[in-house]
Image: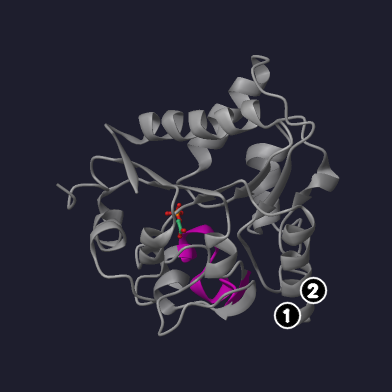
Amino acid sequence: MKIIRTKDYGEMSRRAAGILAAQVILKPDSVLGLATGSTPEGLYRELAEMYERGELDFSDIHTVNLDEYRGISPDNDQSYRFFMQKHLFSKVNIRPECTFVPNGEEADAEKACAAHEAVIKKLGGIDIQLLGIGNNGHIGFNEPGNEFVNETHCVALTESTIAANARFFASVSEVPKEAYTMGIGTIMRAKKILLVANGEQKAEALYRTCCGPVTPEVPASVLQLHPDVTVVADEAALSKIG
Ligand code: PGA
């Protein structure tokens, strides 16, 4: 694992955006695996600015997202499709039909998950997968447990994830209880992984990811087994790693 230590969130965002931008420039028809959450907002802003300056062209890019809540419509402002539209897709020249987020409106979980997995295979796999990390070490919505699940699947969110996401909803009871998420195998098959993290609240999870045993109790720890992982994190998130 390569670790890039930054002084703060702004520098984390710029450095991580630079890595994604390099991917887009070097392989203009890349398949980008994308993530939602507070952490990548700054890097999407950076990418949009680079596009505005004429430095990036997304016209041949495809994107696949990690996850989506189950039972949510794309125009719900808490859906991950809505997040992606707002923070990236509406800001750059990506073709809408080339952006894939699991279909949260599809009630048939098996169908929704198989369709997402099929899209990734049809595109020839993911060139670079962007990841945030949960306070509990989750990646996508692969929550701590006793096994690594291979492909895109439906998960029940843990109490800690529901509590962490409640800040975006009117009340905790409105947070969806299930989600569709790429599996650990789906993520590990990406050619490159870029994990971003900031803030003290991620320090323990990041320490266990990079320095602890590989265990499904800390889903992100599996990344130790991937040959091309770059972690871009600020000092606070790296405070437990010497
Ligand atoms: P965050 O979420 O970026 O909002 O902290 C990360 C995650 O849970 O994967």
Q: Using residue 100 as the reference point, say whether residue 172 is left or right of it.
A: left
Pinpoint residue 30: horizontal percent, then vertical percent. 69, 39
Q: Amino acid at mark 1?
A: Ala
Q: Nearer the viewer, residue 152 or 214?
A: 214
Q: What residue lies at 23% left-to-right and 40% top-to-bottom?
A: 235
Pinpoint residue 33: horizontal percent, then vertical percent. 62, 50
Dots 2, 1 in contact, CB < 8 A: yes
Q: Which residues are magenta?
A: 165-180
Tag 1's secondary structure? helix
Pinpoint residue 48: horizontal percent, then vertical percent. 62, 28
Colour pattern: one colour
Q: Is residue 127 above or below residue 211?
A: above
- Looking at the image, in which quadrant does ligand 1 appear? bottom left
Q: Is residue 131 above or below residue 222?
A: above
Q: Which disc is residue 109 wearing? A: 1
Can I make out residue 12 in this image? yes
Q: Nearer the viewer, residue 32 or 26?
A: 26
Q: How many marks?
A: 2
Tag 2's secondary structure? loop
